[in-house]
Amino acid sequence: MTDSLANMIACPKCDALHRIPHVEKGARARCVRCDTVLMAPRDGAMTRIVMLSATGLILMIGAVFFPFLELNVQGLGRKSSVFDAVLAFSDGLMLPLSFAVAALIVVLPIMRFMALIYVFAPMALGWQPARGAREVFRLAEVIRPWAMAEIFIIGVAVALVKVAGLATVTLGPAFWAFVLLVIVTALKDSFMCRVTVWQTLNQRRV
C-alpha cells in the first residue's frame, strides 16, 4: 500500500475517502458526506473489550448447557437447552442444519470472543501485540456478521409469542444468559474503534 493510501480511510456507508485525522480520546471523527462516525477512540477501551469478551465466554457456557426453557402441556413438562436443540437436528438429512445452528449460535461467537481477547489483552497491558494479532483481528472482523446470538434471541422471542398460546412456557437461566450475552456484545462493539485498533497494531508490531 502506498503512503498516500495508507493515510486514507473510506466511509463504511458512502465510501467517501478521508485522510485519517488525529482524534483525541473521547472525541469523534465523522464523515463529511453522510455524518457516519469514522473514529471514536475511548480511554481504556482495550481493557473493557477484554473484560466484556471474557464475560461473553462465561455467559456462552451457561447459555449453551443450562436449561433454556421449559414447556408444560396438560401436566407434561419438558426442559430443553441450546445444546439439546443442536442435537435435535443431528439425524439424517437435518445434520447440515445441526452444524449450521451450532456454528452460527455457538462456535463463531466463541471464536470471536477468544480472538478479541488474544488481540487486545497483550496491548491492554502495554505489551507488543501477540504473534499474528493482525490476522486474528481480521478473522474476528470477517466472522462478526455471522455470529448470530442476537438473531437467535429475536427468533426465539417471535416463536414464544405463538407457543405461549398452546403451552405454559417457563424461561430458564440460559435464556437470560443469552439476553445478557447480546447486551455484552453490543457494549463490546460500542467500545471498539476499528481504525484505532489497526493503527495501534501497526504502530506496536515488532
Image: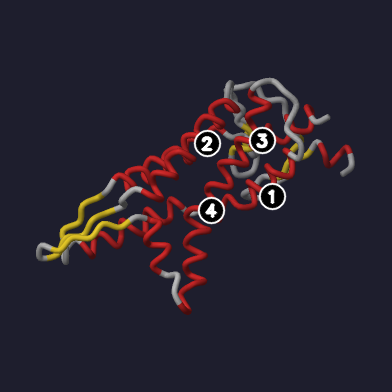
Image point (67%, 25%), residue name: 23
Q: Which residue is more in the foreground, 196 or 58?
A: 58
How many tags in the picture? Answer: 4
CA–CA distance in space, label 2 to label 4 = 14 Å
**In the displayed structure, would residue 38 be above or below residue 99?**
above
- Label located before the other in sequence (1 or 4): 1
Q: Which residue is more in the foreground, 48 or 59?
A: 59
Residue at numbered disc 4 = 107
- Label located before the other in sequence (3 or 2): 2
CA–CA distance in space, label 2 to label 1 = 30 Å
- The reply to whether dot 2 and dot 4 touch (C-beta < 8 Å) is no
Classify mark 2: helix, strand or loop: helix
Instruction: Give the percent coordinates (x, y) of residue 105.
Output: 47, 55
Q: Which residue is more in the foreground, 90 or 121?
A: 90
Instruction: Give the percent coordinates (x, y) of residue 60.
Output: 44, 44
Image point (61%, 28%), residue name: 41
Q: Which mark is residue 53?
A: 2
Residue at numbered disc 3 = 119
The amino acid sitting under disc 2 is Ser
- Label located before the other in sequence (2 or 4): 2
Local packing at callout 1 (Cα closer than 10 Å; few below 14, some 14-19, many 20+) is: few
Classify mark 3: helix, strand or loop: helix
Local packing at callout 2 (Cα closer than 10 Å; few below 14, some 14-19, many 20+) is: many
Q: Nearer the viewer, mark 1 or mark 4?
A: 4
Quadrant of the image occupied by residue 47: top right
Is 176 left, or right, of 167 in this rendering? right
Residue at numbered disc 1 = 15
Instruction: Give the percent coordinates (x, y) of residue 4.
Output: 86, 39
